[in-house]
Each structure stands twice: as structure tokens, then as C-alpha cells.
Amino acid sequence: MRTGILTYGEERVPYTIHEVAGRTSRIAIHVDPDGSVQVDAPPGEPEDRIDQAVRRRARWIVTHVADARARFRHVSPREYVSGEQVLHLGRRYVLKVIVDPAFPGGAKLVANRLEVRLPDPNPTAVRTLVRLWRFARARSYFRKRIEALSKTLPWVSEPPPFELREMARQWGNCAPDGRIVLNPNLVKAPRDAIDYVLVHELAHLKHHNHGAEFTRLLDGAMPDWREIKARLDAMVEVLNG
């Protein structure tokens, strides 16, 4: 993976260059919801052609990076105390911390609350229990949806293996060997957004790039994926908070 720097006025914006197998000519530029810039280029693409493509879209890139950074500035850090809101499958639950010296620690949903019971209510301990609970819920829900979606997608012969990994910039990725990696924070998102990410990664089992054939495959499997993706992108700072 290569990197570069876009200079535009007083702005200096770093970007990463990904050589995408199967891409033959067009250079694609993406500004991720967190403000990161990624350039997809054909393998062996000369640096000067990539630099030229980035400079041609400099104003667009800088504007979108600034918008993404502005969204993140308004997100308050979590304190992991009673009364905070917790997202799960697009619904909001109220965090309730219960001090119980006789209980080793655990978390569970009760009605409209996520109850965390533990002997020491310090924020680090509460955060750990919430994180463990989220991993368990994500693993169970993602497995169920991957199995269900795999039955509806004609190019998937069997549900692929997957693992969970907290990632700063991605909801998921698909390795060349077919193993899917998913961000456990995705389980906070609405169900249709989760399905979009899963279908996107399952589509990479057939086309391991973001070319025209990949897009056509995604269009056929989920015609409204663009609208769902736009809503998911708008929530990224909340979901990863």
C-alpha cells in the first residue's frame, strides 16, 4: 500500500493508494465517513497519473474531508455511566449500571435498558463489559444473517467463515481466501444497514474489487443499497463512538 499527500492552499490531506486487481484504467477516489481518503488504482499505475487524478479532484476531496471532520467534532466521548444511551440494531437503550458486590460482572438487555451489573462501577470496567456483550451479540446476529443471506445469493455456495475485529475505517472486508472480517460496532446499526454491509462483503466472493461488475451484482441483490449506505455513512461517528 502506497501513500501520498494532497496540498490544496493551506490544507495538506494524506491519502492511501490501493492497487485493485481487475481495475484496468479508471482511478477512483473515496472519502470515507471518518475523513480518510482512499485512491483505488490499477496495479502498477504510475505515481504521476495518480497525483494528477487526485489534484483534479482536490476541491471535492478537501470539502468532503472537512465535512467529515466537522461531524466528528460534535460527538461527545462516552463516560459509561447510568443514563447514557446505547445503540443496538438501530434501537436506543438506556445504560443502567448496577453495583452488586456479590456478582462477578455481566451485561444484558432488560426491556428498554442495557443493565450492567458488577462489583466496581468504574467506567473502564463498565466499558469492558459493554464491549464483551456487544461482541457476543454481534457474533450471534452476523452469523444468523450471513447464513440467511447466503441462501438468497446465487453465487454463494455456502456461508463463508467470518471473524470480528474493531476497525477505525471499515465496517467489513473480504480476504482473498473468502474469510470475512466484520466490525462489531456494526451491530449498533439498523438491520437493513447491517444487511447492506454483509451483502457487500459477500459480493466480494465473486468480484474482489469495486468495478462495474461488482456494482451490477450489488444492484441486483439489493437495489436500494446506495440509500442505505448513505444513511450508514451519516451515522458513522455515532456508531463508532
Image: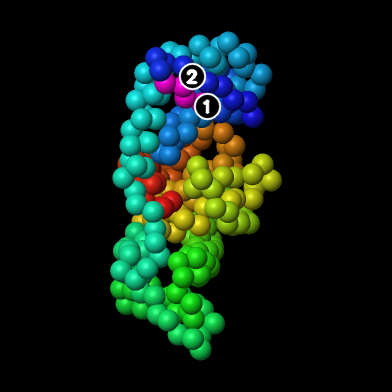
How far apart marks 1 and 2 lie (CA) works out to 7 Å
**Helix or strand or loop: what does disc 1 sit on?**
strand
Task: Write the residue at 50% across / 11% down.
Answer: 52
- Tag 1: residue type? Tyr
Residue at mark 2: 6
Residue range corresponding to the magenta coloring: 11-15
The one nearer the camera, 216 or 39, is: 39
Classify 10 Å Cα crowding around label 2: few (below 14), some (14-19), many (20 and above).
Answer: some
Residue 12 covered by magenta stretch:
yes
Taking 179 as reference, is 187 above or below it? below
Residue 132 covered by magenta stretch:
no
Taking 216 as reference, is 163 above or below it? below
Question: Percent from the top left, x then y, of residue 77?
Answer: 39, 54
Question: Percent from the top left, x then y, of residue 178?
Answer: 64, 47
Tag 1 near tag 2, CB within 8 Å? yes
Classify 10 Å Cα crowding around label 1: few (below 14), some (14-19), many (20 and above).
Answer: many
Task: Write the residue at 60% across / 14% down.
Answer: 47
**Helix or strand or loop: what does disc 2 sit on?**
strand
Q: How many numbered marks, from 0 up? A: 2
The mark found on residue 85 in the picture is none
- Tag 2: residue type? Leu
Question: Is any atom of residue 147 visible in this view?
Answer: yes
Residue at mark 1: 15
